[in-house]
Image (tube, rainbow, N blue to C red):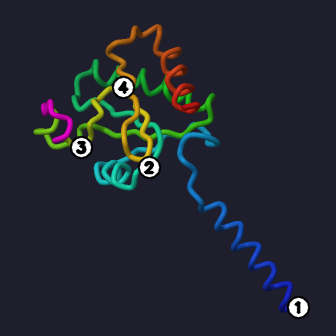
Amino acid sequence: MSLKKVFSGCLVLLLVLVISACESDGVKGRIGKATELDLKEVKAFMDDKKTGFLYVKSAFDSDSDKESDQLQLSEIERVAEAEKIDFYVFDAKELPTSELYEQDTSKRTLEQNSGTFAFYQEGEMKEELDFTDILEDDFSSEVEKFVQNMKHD
């Protein structure tokens, strides 16, 4: 095999690696995958001005909170797969207890409330879907509308 062919092959491989390593905006062209983030990663998401969807699990351990998280996440996952978007999940139990009751969002690590699904654009929350205001039967359609609106804005 000639040196020219080896060199050309290496260039093609490098190009493929570079293209595959390029990060998407986290909204379009994905597979509906949920990625769990810890507190450090959520801070980096905001600081690095990332764009994408984030669901924040409840900070409490009651059976009803766990059940709500499970129901809401299953609807989000279903819609994410259909809409081909990836999203992030953060467990609010990781937040310092003092932040759980802080009303001033500017003093919190994350301005998003637990039990909500939000869209961030360049690290800033653009809109938040609060499930407490939605009937359980309407979860599916509300998540669909929310995702579609955020994808097209």
Query: Which residue occupies 75% across, 78% down?
Result: 11
Q: Closer to the N terminus: mark 4 or mark 1? A: 1
Rounded to the nearest angstrom, the CA distance separating label 4 from label 3 is: 15 Å
**Closer mark to the observer between disc 1 and disc 2:** 2
Residue 61 % position (x, y): 23, 28
- Disc 4 marks which residue? 69
- Nearer to us in this view, 112 or 137: 112
| Residue sitting at x 31%, y 38% | 91
Res. 50 mark: 2
Q: Nearer the viewer, residue 145 or 64?
A: 145
For the residues marked 1 and 3, what is the alpha-carbon distance in whole angstroms? 56 Å
| Above/below status of 138 relative to 85 | above
Give residue 151's quadrant in the image.
top right
C-alpha distance separating marks 3 and 2: 20 Å
Type of residue at label 4?
Asp
- Decide which of 102, 3 is in the foreground and name it: 102
Tell me the residue that label 3 is attached to.
Answer: 94
* Label located before the other in sequence (1 or 2): 1
Q: Are marks 4 and 2 in contact (CB under 8 Å)?
A: no
Rendering coords of residue 8 (x, y %) = 81, 81
Quadrant in the picture for the C terminus: top right
Q: Amino acid at mark 2?
A: Lys
**Residue 132 to residue 43: above or below:** above
- Tag 3 or tag 4, which sits nearer the N-term? 4
Where disc 4 sits, the SS reads helix
- Is 104 magenta? The answer is yes
The image quadrant of residue 3 is bottom right
Question: Which span of residues is magenta-colored?
Answer: 101-107
